[in-house]
Amino acid sequence: MKETWSKLRKQPLFMPILMLILVLLINLFKDPGFFSIAVKNGVLYGRLIDVLNRGSEIAILAVGQTLVIAVSAGTDISVGSVMALAASGGCMVLAGYGNTSVTGIVAPIAVGVIVGLLFGLGSGCINGLMVSKLKIQPMVATLIFFTAARAIGLLLCNNQIIYIRYEPYKYLGNFLPHVPIPTPILVTILIIIIAQLVLKRTSLEMYIQSVGINNRASRICGINSDMICFICYAICGLCAGAAGMIASSRIYSADSNNIGLNYEMYSILAVALGGNSLAGGKFNMAGSIVGAYTIQAIMTTLLALGVSTDQSPVFMAILVILIVVIQSPVFKKWMEERRVRRAEAGKEAA
Amino acid sequence: MANNRQTAVRSKKRVSGNNLLLLITIVLFIVMYAAGCIVYSAKGFTHFQTFLNILITNAGLICVACGMTCVMLTGGIDISVGSLIAMDCMILADGMTNKHWGAIQLVIFVMIVGVVWGSAQGFLVAYMNIQPFIVTMAGMFFGRGMTAVINTEQVSITQDVNKLFYGWANAKIKLPEFLGYMGKKHRIAPFIRPSVILALLVVVLIFFILRYTKFGRVLYAVGGNETSAAMMGLNVRKTKLCAYILSSVLCSFGGILYCLNTMTGSVQQAKGFEMDAIAAAVIGGTLLTGGVGNVIGTLFGVLITGTINSLVMTNGKLLSSWANIMTAALLCIFILLQAIFAYIKKRRES
Amino acid sequence: MSDGDNVLITMRDITKTFPGVVALDHARLTVRRGEIHALMGENGAGKSTIIKCLTGVYERDSGDVHMEGVEGNIFNHSTMDAQKIGIATVYQEVNLCPNLSVAENLFIGREPRTRLHTIDWKKMNRMARELMERLQIEVDVTETLENYSIAIQQMVAIARAVDMEAKVLILDEPTSSLDDKEVEKLFVMMRRLKDQGVGIIFVTHFLDQVYEVCDRITVMRNGKFVGEYTVSELPRVKLVAAMLGKEMNDLADIKGADSGKELGDLLYEGEGLSHKGTIKPFDFTIHKGEVVGLAGLLGSGRSELVRCIYGVDNSQTGSSRMEGKPLKIKAPIDSIKAGMGYLPDDRKADGCIGGLSVRENIIIALQARNGLFKRIPMAKQIEIADRYIDLLQIKTASRETLLSQLSGGNQQKVILARWLATDPKFLILDEPTRGIDIGTKTEIQKLVLQLADRGMGIVFISSEIEEMLRTCSKMLIMRDGANVGHLDAKDIELTQENVMGAIAGGETK
C-alpha cells in the first residue's frame, strides 16, 4: 500500500490532478449538485460541463505556452492580447470593415476563422523572430504585442465592438446543431490530439526539450535551435488565434478590450500548476492541460463564492508567486538545509 | 607606449552607440514636434501651452518612467506599474468618496503602499532569485485585482468630496504672459500645474542620485556586470531590493500625480501604462540589458510618447489606439537599434 | 628554506574534496615577496581550486595557510576577506564593470566623498589619473571602460588591486585573449610591481611566457603538488614532463602492430581554416583509417582547431573537402550530414543534455541528421540505444534513465554512443577520456583502434601523451594557436620524449 502510494506520488501528473480534485471537492461541499449532468434541450448541462467548456481557451493557450516556456525559459505574455487581435481580425473579415452589427456575413465563416488563425500565427512568428534571431528577452519581445495587439484589434474594428448576429457563427463557441457537447470542448480535444500527433510523430518534442535544456549541446548535435524556438512561438501564436476565435464566437462579437483579458496570466499559471518548471527544459503537456482546467475550476468556484472576474486575478497572482517560490532553487536549498538541521537535531537528541 | 596612446585617441573618436541612441531620441523628438507644429498649426499645436499640456498630462508618467529607469539599470524590469497606479488612484478616490478620509492621510497611505509593494517585489527578485518579469507580472494582476476588490465601480473625485485634493488638482501656476498667445482680447498666459514642478523635481532628484551617490553608481555597476559588482565587494542584492522599492515609491507618487490629472479611480485605468513607461525609458537610451541609461533621456522618452498622444488627439479623426500602436512600434524600433548596436560592438571586439 | 624571511604566503597540505572527487590532495604553494610565481598544470590539476581556496571562493577541508603580517592560520570566507588582508585576483574575464568609466572602476565602493557625502568626481578622476601615471598606463580615466582593449582593462583591474594595497596578486590566465604586444605591456607592468615587492601568482598555459617573466614555478598534477622549481634551472622538457606525468616509462608496449599499416584514401582535407582570435590559419588532412593525435598543452589551440573543422562557431574561414567533395559548413548539422562527428571537450556545457534520457541522448544526433519529420520509430530507437549500452557497457539503471543521473564516465560513453550511432566517416574526439577511470579509458582506446581498422578517420585529443602514443599513427603538435609540426609513427621518432620536446619547443639542445 505504502509502496503504491509513493509510486503514485512520483507520477508527474500526481500534483496537478490532486490540485484539481481538491478544488472540485470544495465545490462538492458547497454545492452537492456540482457533479450532476443533465440533458436539457438536447444539450448537456451541468457545472462540470461548464468548467470543461469555459476552460477550453485556457487549455488551448496552455498547449502553446508550455512549448514556449520549455524552449526558451521565458513566457509569451502576449497571448491574451493576441486572442483579442485574432477575434477582431476574424470578425472584421466576416462583417466587413466599418460595420458594427451585422445579421449576415460577407465572407464564409471558414475564411473568417482562418484569417483569425493567421493573425495569431503572424503575431507568434513576429514574437518568434524577435526572440530566436534577435535574442531579445522573451518577455520584452512579447510585451510589445501585449499592448499593441489590442490596439491593432481596436483599429480593425474601428474602435467599436463588432456584433455578428448570425446563427452559424455561434456554433464554434456554443453548440453545433444536434451535438450535445459544447463545441469548444470538441475543438480543445482536437487541438490537443493534433499537438500530441505533431509532438510525438515528429521528433519535435525531443528537440524542444533538448534546446530548452542545453542550447549549445543541441546545436552541436545538429539541431537548428533558433528554428525550434521560432516554431514554438509560432505555435503559441496559432493557439492564441484559435482561443480568440472561440472566445469571440461565444459572445458572437469582437470586443478587443475584453476578449482574453488576463488570459496570459492564466496560461502561465496553468503551465506552472501542471508541474512544469518556468525555467524551461522538460515539459509535460498533460500536466499543463490539467492545470488549465484546475484554474477554470478555481475561477468557477470563486465566482460561486461571489468573487467577480475582475477580482479573481488577486488569487491567481498569489498562486503564481507561491508556485514560483516553491520551484525556486533558493527555496529548495533552504528547505534542504532545514531538513538537514532537523535531522542533525534529531540525532543529537537521540 | 606610442601604441598605447593610439588606442586612447582612437577610443575618443568613436561615437559610442549609447550616446548615439540618446542623440537619435532628441532629434526624433524635435522632428516630431516640428512636424506637428507644421501640420497642425491651425489647431493650435504651435502654442506653448500645447507643450505644457504634454507635461501636465504626463507628469505621472515622468515619475513612473524615472523609477522604471532605475530598475532597468540593474537589468530588471517592473511591469506592475500600471496596475499599481490604478490601485493608488482607486485608494485615493474610494478613500475620499466612500470612506471620507483626508487627502493628506491618503497620500501618505499610498506612499506606504508603494514601499510595501516594492519591498515585496524586490525581495522576491533579489533574494529569491525569481525572474523580475514573473514577479512583476504577478504584481500586475494582483494590483488590477485589488483595485476591483476595493471598488468595481468607477469613482470620481469631485469638489464636494474633498476640497483640498480638488484644490491641488486645479491649482494653476501662471507663466509670464509673453510666452502665451493672443486670445480674442488679450494675451492668454500659459500655465502649468504643480504636478509638473513635482515631476521635474523627481527627475532632478533621480538624476542626482544616479550621478552623485554610491547607490546610484552601484545600480549601474550591477547592471554592467553583476558578478563583477559582487566581486568588487558591492552588495548586489540590497541594491536590487532598493531599486524595486524606489521604483514602486516613485510609481505611487506618479499615481498621485496621475490621479490629480484624471480625478477618477477605476479598474480600467492606466492600462498599458507599464508599456509607456518602459517605452519612455528604452527610447530614452536605457538598455534592456541594464547598465546604461539616464533620466534625462527618459524625460525625452516621455516627451516623445506624450507628443505621439498629443498628435493623435489633435488630429481628432485618428483612433486613440493609434497612439498605443505608434508607441509600441517605436519601442520595437529602439529595441532593434539596441540589438544592432550590440551586434556591431561585438563584431568590432572580435 | 633559505629565503624564509621573504616568504609572503605559505599554503601547506591543502585538501579539498567535492562530492566524488578529490580536487586537492595535500597540495602546497609558497610565494615570496617580489617574485613572479608560475602555477602550472593541465586540466584538473587543481590550479584553480587551490587559488579559490586561497581567495575564499572555496573553503578548504584541511591544511594551513599562513601569510606574512597576519596572525595564525588564515581562513577566508569570501573574496572580500582575502582582499582585506591583501590578496587580490585578476581573472581572464576581467571582473570590472564595462559600462562605467575607468576611474569609477578603480574606486567604486570606496569613492572619495564631498562634505555632503556625495561622490567627488573631480577628486576621484584626479586620484585615478595619478594612479594611472604611477603605473604608466596611458588611458583617459573618464572614458568608459568597454572602449578599451581587454589588455588595458586587465591593467585597470590590476591597478585597482594594487591601489587596494595588494601584497599578493593572483593573475588567472590573464594573457589568453591578448596579442603579443599587449602581453608585452602586461609583462612590463608585472615586472614593475614585482620590483615594488608584490608577490605575483601567475597562472598560465603558455610556456614561453613563463620563461620570459617568471622566477619560480610550482607544478601540480591531479590535485597533487609535483614540485617547486626555479625557472632558470628547469629545462622546458622537464617542465612538460612534470606537468604531464611520466609514470609510463615503458615505451615498448606502445603499439607497433599497425604502425606499418598502409594509409587509406584521403578522407578529409581543410585548407586555410581558421577562427578569428583563437587560431592561426592551418591546413589539415586525414586519411581513412588514420588516427591523428593533436598534442599540445591546454590553450595551445588543439580544441579550437577541431571546433573549427566541425564548424561549432559560425565565423569559419577557409575551405574543406570530404572525400574530394567540397563542404559548405554553416552549422554543425552540415558537418553531421557530411559524415562528421564531434565529441566536445566540455562535456557538461557542450555535450550532455542532462534532462533527456539515455536513449534520447544516444539517438539525438542521428535523429537530427534524419530531420525533424523522419522520426526514428521507437522500436528502432530502443534497438540502437540497447546496442550501444551493451557495446560500450554503459552502466545505467535503464535506457530511460536521465543522463544527468549517470556518472561522468558513463555520460561520456553515452555521448560517444551518440556519435557512433550516426556511423560517421570522420570522428573528432576531444578529451574523450577526461575524468574517466582507467578501465574505461583502455576500453575507449581499444574502441578507437577498432573503429580506425574499419576505415574511420579519427582525431584524438588528450592531455595524456602516452594515451595518444598508444592510439595515434600520427601526431600534430600545437603550440600557441598554431600547428608547429608533426611526428609520424612510421619513423621511430614517436616517443614520449620527442613529443614532449616538440610541445615544449623553444629550446635547442
Image (cartoon, grey):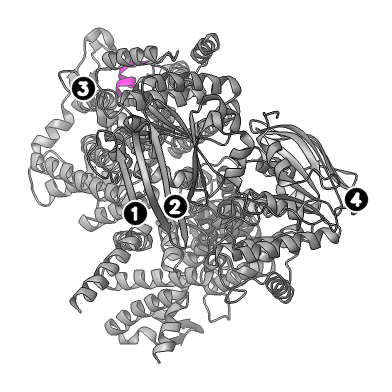
Q: Earlier in the sequence, mark 1 or mark 2?
A: 2
Q: CA distance from mark 4 to mark 3?
A: 75 Å
Q: Chain of mark 1?
A: C
Q: Chain of mark 3?
A: C
Callouts 4 and 3 in the same chain: yes
Kind of residue indicated by mark 4: Leu
What residue is shown at x 53% (from left), y 31% (from top)? C231
Magenta part, dominant SS: helix
Write down the residue under mark 2.
C24
Looking at the rendered structure, the secondary structure element under dot 3 is loop
**In the image: residue C75, left or right of residue A279:** left
Kind of residue indicated by mark 3: Thr
Write down the residue under mark 4.
C263
The boundaries of the magenta stretch are B46-53
Callouts 2 and 3 in the same chain: yes
Write down the residue under mark 3.
C118
Looking at the rendered structure, the secondary structure element under dot 4 is loop
